[in-house]
Amino acid sequence: MDPIQLTRRNSNPESYIKYNLSAVSKFLDVIQRYEYDIAPKTNTRQLLFPEDRPKRKKKPYDQIDYIPEYVLEQLFANLNYLHPEVQPLVWIAFKTGLRISDVLGLTQDCLVRINGKYYIETDIEKTYVKGHRIPIDDELANMVAALI
């Protein structure tokens, strides 16, 4: 890793420190194993303490995970290179916010029209929500109808 990477918006200093401490630890283990002159006399485990390594922070339960903007840009820039059967799945997941596992579980009766507006009605597996309706635009409704 490059020190310049720590100044980026999506940098992870804890991961950077952990990666570099692992490299140093491995280096010290190897030079001790082969008994080089520069090898420290003290065991490597006594040189690097567990508290030197940053602990992985747990996410709060209510924190919303999302796909970063730069990943979405890459995905849509290269969408035409994906298999033709996968492209509609990506669009449905993007426009509805459903997980890919829920998109793959859509049935033929998922497209619903109520008062002239289209909805996708599905059961969300992870949160055990039954009959969840998501409003969609006419373009996505036409795509789903063609797939059905």
Image (cartoon, rainbow, N blue to C red):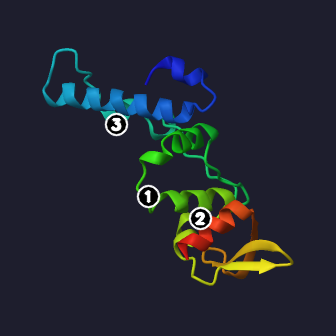
Hey, what amino acid is under mark 2? Arg
Instruction: Kindly report which numbered mark, 3 or 2, lies closer to the viewer in this rendering.
Output: 2
Q: Quadrant of residue 133?
A: bottom right
Q: Is residue 55 visible?
A: no
Q: Nearer the viewer, mark 1 or mark 2?
A: 1
Above or below: residue 110 compared with residue 50: below
Tell me which label, 3 or 1, sits earlier in the chain. 3
- Residue shown at 53% from the left, 39% from the top: 77
Indicate which disc residue 45 carries: 3
The image shows residue 148 at horizontal and vertical percentages of: 55, 77
Residue tagged 2:
99
Q: Horizontal placement of 64 versus 81: left or right?
A: right
- Return the residue nearer the eye: 145 or 73: 145
- Quickly name the residue at label 1: 84
Q: Which residue is more in the foreground, 87 or 100?
A: 87
Please identify the residue farthest to the right as the structure is shown: 115
Instruction: Please name the residue shown 50% across and 36% down the image.
Output: 15
Q: Position of residue 69 (x, y in %)?
A: 63, 40
Give the secondary structure at mark 3.
Answer: helix
In-image side of 64 versus 13 (left or right)? right
Tag 3: residue type?
Arg
- Provide the secondary structure element on which disc 1 rests: loop
| Quarter occupied by residue 60 | bottom right
Measured in 3D between alpha carbons, the distance from the residue under mark 3 to the one under mark 1, in whole angstroms, is: 53 Å
Q: Looking at the image, is mark 1 or mark 2 earlier in the sequence?
A: 1
Estimate how packed mark 3 is, as few (under 14), some (14 to 19) or many (20 or more) residues with alpha carbons within 10 Å: few
Q: Earlier in the sequence, mark 3 or mark 2?
A: 3
Q: CA distance from mark 3 to mark 2?
A: 43 Å
Quadrant location, the N terminus:
top left
**Quick one: label 2, few (<14), some, or many (20+) residues within 10 Å?**
some
